Amino acid sequence: MDEESSPGRYRGRRRAPVAPRSRYAAVFTTAVVGAGVVALGSGAAFEDAKLNRDQAALSELAAAFESRAEAAERASRTDRSEGGLATSVAEAPDMWLLPLSDYSYSSSYGWRWGRMHNGIDLAAPQGTPVYAMHGGTVILSGWYAGYGYAVIIDHGDGVETLYAHNSQLLVSEGQEVSAGERITLIGNTGYSFGPHLHLEVHVNGVPQEPIGWLKERDVDIVGVTDPLYTS
């Protein structure tokens, strides 16, 4: 499928839910600081050298605890480039996501050149990773006539998504995938005139207009927002 226009590039930014810093870290840090204040207030009862040592030890302990809390916060975030969104998506299995994080919306659903274009086209550089929009089972992974190298995922309840014109397939038939899992790389195979992803959504075998259907599930293809990305 070719691209009729390139109205501009969009780049999604991560908006993954970030776990708040541990309450225990905040309480412990407060207690440590309070202890330091008490120690300083009792200076007459201790030698200056001991006060200095105690204050330094308390400061080091507080800094270490703060560093550990920040490390835990960073670990709670997820990164598509390092294996997908397993942690956050596992907690929200009904989540739908964008198939790409950087692309140009290049062709719409509808009649074109006297025939029906049953999906939308998202242009991106050759080799750009494509991600499963929702969890499901891979029911096709291979050459699919004019679609070139394609993947179809069955999400249950009669819903299937198709990802076409890929340069490389990263999943196999029968494989279970999660939302945000890398499944293909952008290509220009089959009936195509430039690297792009041709995306289709089918419900009970009937093609849907993907933009409106996905927007009902909080994924905005044109505005490039989804539960983890914002424009």
Image (spheres, rainbow, N blue to C red):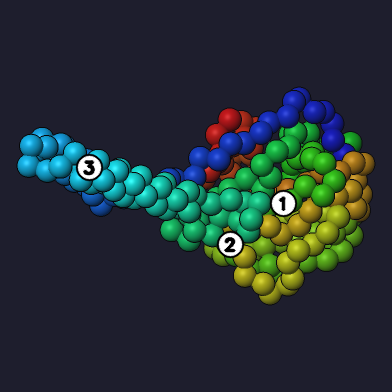
Q: Is residue 70 above or below residue 162?
A: above
- Amino acid at the residue labelled 2: Ser
Extreme residue in the top direction: 7
Residue plotted at (79% across, 40% down) = 124
Q: Is residue 71 above or below residue 43?
A: below
Q: Quick check: can you spot residue 216?
A: no
Which of the 4 quarters of the picture holds residue 13? top right
- Amino acid at the residue labelled 3: Ala
Instruction: Please state if 166 lies on the left or on the right of 129 as rendered.
Output: right
Q: Which residue is mark 2?
A: 178
| Residue nearest the viewer, comparing 38 with 128 | 38
Instruction: Please state if 20 lies on the left or on the right of 99 as rendered.
Output: left
State if disc 3 and disc 2 touch (CB < 8 Å): no
**What x and y, as percent, mark residue 127?**
82, 49
Which is closer to the viewer, label 1 or label 3? 3
Q: Which residue is mark 3?
A: 49
Q: Which residue is mark 1?
A: 130
Q: Is residue 44 above or below residue 21?
A: above
Mark 2 and mark 3: Cα distance apart in space: 59 Å
- Amino acid at the residue labelled 1: Val
Q: Regarding mark 1 in the picture, which secondary structure is present there? A: strand
Mark 1 and mark 2: Cα distance apart in space: 13 Å
Answer with mark 2 or mark 3, whichever residue precedes in sequence. Answer: 3
Mark 1 and mark 3: Cα distance apart in space: 62 Å
Q: Regarding mark 2 in the picture, which secondary structure is present there? A: loop
Which is closer to the viewer, label 2 or label 3? 3
In which quadrant is the N terminus drawn? top right
Q: Regarding mark 3 in the picture, which secondary structure is present there? A: helix
**What x and y, as percent, mark residue 153?**
67, 62
